[in-house]
Image (cartoon, helix red, strand yellow):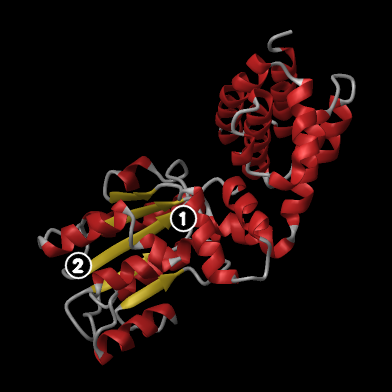
Amino acid sequence: MQSLLTTTRAYRLLGADEQRGELSHAYLLLFDDGPNLRVALKTFAKRLFACEKEETQAQQRVSKLIDDENFSDCLFFPEPGKKFMVEDAETISEESLLKPVEGEKKLFVVDGFDFATPAAQNKLLKLLEEPPEGVLFLLGARTEYPVLPTVLSRVKTLEIPPFSTEEIKGALLRNYGGRYEMNDYELCAAACGGSLGAAQDMLDSGSYKQLVENAFALCLAKSHELPQAVKKVGDTKRKRELLSLLRILFRDALLYKTGTLAKNAMLQSEKSRLQAIANGYSLSALVYAQEAISEAEKDVAFNAYFPQCVELLIAKIQRKGK
């Protein structure tokens, strides 16, 4: 993960600020990968303490202390698995009055700031606006929507966009080696929406297999069978991944429909079912599917009722071209 993070524009921007001596006193790191957000925060914290390369024993020591969350000048909040509360903000206020132990910087890292209560966010406002000398903040969130506008106005935002399918696949290969088939890596990398954490979770839990079955059931359902197929999917927690899979299936089916680039289909092991989708939809419907899925992804992002959203999506694609 760290090798991916250090190639991002957000990481380069932070480095450029540091080199120019123009560090902001507060940064908001936006990274839509909950399982790896804390790792990202540690990676950026190491850049702020110039220990990311680990070229000397001193750098190696600080880097390891940050990884272990034991560095006296880099304090992490809240405890893993918990939400940032008013009590955490009060602790930061008290700790910010103490001088750094080993250098001139004291960094407060807050994980999951998008889950912080409004009261806890408000408690930090004065510190974010006028921190003591040498005090920096690094706030991490998956999305900025739950962050108060008053907080957003006091921080500099660094956003890490979704990683590409190839970047995710490479990271999975480095992490898992030959534990899974290449097709499994490619499928999870394509379906995870650019989130390495989601891809890892799909592999570790084996849930990608059921997701594939659900996606095929939706694509192959006749109009009168669609409500039952949607019912089986339900209000799944893997909404983004299922929509990504639907995008892959309709894309692959389009390749089979045209008969020119079928060798580039993502799911090479599913030729018969992909051909069935290609036969069941018109060419215009398969082309339209990509646009319709993009609209559905926006609706889901704004908390649309997922089963109804999926049923409407498939129904619209089925009607296209008829």
Q: Which label's residue is closer to the chain start, 2 or 1?
A: 2
Which image quadrant is residue 278 in? Answer: top right
Q: Residue furthest left?
A: 20
Residue pointed to by mark 2: 132
Q: Amino acid at mark 2?
A: Pro
Residue pointed to by mark 1: 167
Q: Is residue 36 left or right of residue 268?
A: left
| Residue 34 seen | yes
The picture places residue 306, in percent across and down from the top left corner, at: 70, 33
Above or below for 23 versus 256:
below
Mark 1 Cα-neighbour bin, 10 Å: few <14, some 14–19, many ≥20: some
Circles 2 and 1: CB distance less than 8 Å?
Answer: no
Q: Residue furthest top?
A: 322
As measured in the structure, the alpha-carbon distance from the residue carrying label 2 to the one carrying label 1 is 40 Å
Q: Is residue 254 left or right of residue 10?
A: right
| Residue 84 seen | no
Location of the C terminus by quadrant is top right
Q: Is residue 172 left or right of residue 114?
A: right
